[in-house]
Image (spheres, rainbow, N blue to C red):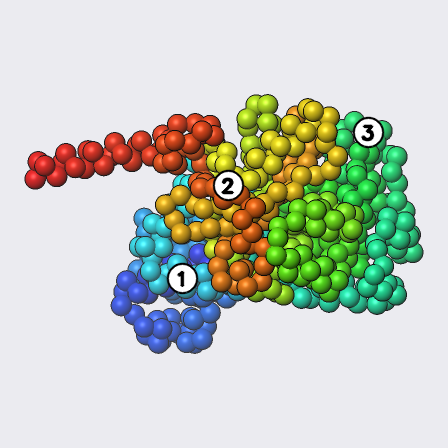
């Protein structure tokens, strides 16, 4: 995080370096003319030091500007967007330090290629303002990139779970049942209250809250046993890992820093790993992957065995597949939708190794109705209407992306949310390459349906698509532009 003091030093350093270069002065020459040491001038330019007033006056005189210019927030046209960035919320919405970038390295980047970087930064600021991107938007995107950077497998958290199990003498086969988890919290002096939140109407949208002062963990009504287990395991993680910079409510109302969101992720990761112990889960997954035929019941049994939510199981798969099976070309999607209204929204996504298709679209376009993610929602709704729904629906599909060589094995689990007509599905997409073919024997099972798909209807050129929810407006725009280009060529 870049503090106000960091900003002041960075801006002064940026101006001094730009003016020195404009004057054609070397570090040595500026140091000699101002009577400062070479290292001190370097520290000023890299934002490490902020000199006293007499030294700033000396710098201003040699560089041909006044004192106020050096210490103000104004600059020339080339530097002003960078200064605006340094003073904006945007710069603190990006967790630079988590990606190995320091304020000094940022300043070096900004000042070495000012024209191109300034134009790029100015563009980012305009986009963030035009699309009203919040800090949470940036935090979420940064968190997903952070997960991708580590293949979504965090050995220190896996080790912490092993240490916890050893400390509390949990063997590999011991299931983390609700009484056991609640007992752990009781042992460390935290009481669980399931009544108080229920009586407060304003808190009906929250799942849980930890009151630090009274050391009480409140759980709201309407939670499934699996959801309760996760909430308890997640709170154990906060306490066991001694995480103090954290959210106290679920669902998070706002994040004041990236660290809060990252710590929430770490506690959630620990909680899921506690419920699905790594070595045992990997062996269970391996048995399914070795089967020569697709078996939806095997995946359903895996989910029920651990007594977790479908999302927790799919998320856990994204932790272990890259590490233990070398399958790192994958994506995760959570989609919610109202089948009657034919409206669907991607509410969570993760991409490892590359930006895979499908992906969220911020332009409110219609996602491809051929996705197994959406079809499984429709199948779930049909079973509900026929009063035949018994358990989440597990389906697989091989999705061939239109006009590309990309083929994905997509495994989707869908269920009703309990809120009117809303359904939710979680999907794991695995790029079909040599690694996947070697690891999963059932990929070539002809019983798995194969469909040509795209990202949104508006961008899809499959003209005979019976499932289309909207006309291919973006394709038509491209065709119109191509006709204009061809006509202009005839005039040359």
The numbered mark, 3 or 2, whose residue comes first in the sequence reads 3
Is the residue 86 above or below the residue 464 in the image?
Answer: below
- Please name whichever residue, 258 or 195, is drawn nearer the observer in this view of the structure: 195
Q: Are there few (<14), some (14-19), or many (20+) residues within 10 Å of tag 1?
A: few
State which quarter of the image contains the C terminus: top left
Question: Residue 245 placed where, x, y %?
Answer: 71, 53
The numbered mark, 2 or 1, whose residue comes first in the sequence reads 1
Q: Is residue 77 left or right of residue 106?
A: left
- Would residue 215 be visible to someone looking at this image? no
- Please name whichever residue, 410 or 239, is drawn nearer the observer in this view of the structure: 410
Is the residue 43 above or below the residue 302 in the image?
Answer: below
Q: CA distance from mark 2 to mark 1?
A: 31 Å
Q: Residue at x 38, y 35 (%)?
A: 462
The numbered mark, 1 or 3, whose residue comes first in the sequence reads 1
- Please name whichever residue, 485 or 450, is drawn nearer the observer in this view of the structure: 450
Q: CA distance from mark 1 to mark 3?
A: 51 Å
Q: Which residue is disc 3 drawn over?
A: 200
Q: Which mark is residue 413?
A: none
Q: Residue at x 35, y 76 (%)?
A: 28
Q: Which residue is disc 2 drawn over?
A: 360
Tell me which corner region of the image, top left, top right, bottom left or bottom right, holds residue 159: bottom right
Helix, strand or loop under label 3: loop
Q: Are there few (<14), some (14-19), or many (20+) residues within 10 Å of tag 2?
A: some
Q: Residue at x 57, y 46 (%)?
A: 447
State which quarter of the image contains the N terminus: bottom right
């Amino acid at each position: 995080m870049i503090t106000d003091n960091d900003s002041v030093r960075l801006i002064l350093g940026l101006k001094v370096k730009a003016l020195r270069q404009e004057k054609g002065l070397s570090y040595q020459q500026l140091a000699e003319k101002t009577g400062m040491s070479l290292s001190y001038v370097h520290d000023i330019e890299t934002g490490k030091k902020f000199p006293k007033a007499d030294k700033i006056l000396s710098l201003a005189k040699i560089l041909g500007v006044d004192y106020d210019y050096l210490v103000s927030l104004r600059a020339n046209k080339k530097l002003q967007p960078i200064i605006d960035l340094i003073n904006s919320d945007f710069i603190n919405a990006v967790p630079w330090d988590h990606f190995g970038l320091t304020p000094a390295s940022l300043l070096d980047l900004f000042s070495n290629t000012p024209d191109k970087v300034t134009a790029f930064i100015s563009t980012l600021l305009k986009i963030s303002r035009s699309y009203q991107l919040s800090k949470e938007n940036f935090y979420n995107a940064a968190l997903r990139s952070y997960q991708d950077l580590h293949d979504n497998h965090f050995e220190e958290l896996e080790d912490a779970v092993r240490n916890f199990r050893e400390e509390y003498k949990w063997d590999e086969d011991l299931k983390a049942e609700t009484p056991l988890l609640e007992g752990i919290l009781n042992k460390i002096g935290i009481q669980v209250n399931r009544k108080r939140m229920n009586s407060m109407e304003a808190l009906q949208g929250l799942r849980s809250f930890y009151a630090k002062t009274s050391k009480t963990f409140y759980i709201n009504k309407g939670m499934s046993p699996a959801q309760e287990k996760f909430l308890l395991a997640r709170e154990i993680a906060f306490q066991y890992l001694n995480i103090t910079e954290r959210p106290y409510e679920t669902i998070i109302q706002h994040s004041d820093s990236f660290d809060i969101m990252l710590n929430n992720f770490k506690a959630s990761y620990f909680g899921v790993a506690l419920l699905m112990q790594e070595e045992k889960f990997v062996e269970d997954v391996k048995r399914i992957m070795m089967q020569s035929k697709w078996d939806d019941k095997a995946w359903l049994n895996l989910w029920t065995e651990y007594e977790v939510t479908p999302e927790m199981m799919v998320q856990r798969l994204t932790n272990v597949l890259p590490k233990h099976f070398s399958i790192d070309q994958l994506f995760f999607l959570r989609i919610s939708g109202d089948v009657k209204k034919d409206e669907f929204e991607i509410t969570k996504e993760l991409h490892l190794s590359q930006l895979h298709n499908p992906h969220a679209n911020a332009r409110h376009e219609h996602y491809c109705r051929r996705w197994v993610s959406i079809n499984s929602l429709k199948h779930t709704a049909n079973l509900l209407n026929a009063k035949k729904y018994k358990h989440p629906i597990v389906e697989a599909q091989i999705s061939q992306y239109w006009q590309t060589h990309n083929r994905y094995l997509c495994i989707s689990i869908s269920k009703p949310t309990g809120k009117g007509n809303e359904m939710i599905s979680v999907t794991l997409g695995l790029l079909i390459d040599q690694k996947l073919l070697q690891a999963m024997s059932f990929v070539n099972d002809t019983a798995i349906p194969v469909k040509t798909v795209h990202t949104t209807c508006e961008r899809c050129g499959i003209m005979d698509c019976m499932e289309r929810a909207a006309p291919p407006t973006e394709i038509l725009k491209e065709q119109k532009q191509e006709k204009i280009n061809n006509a202009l060529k005839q005039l040359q």
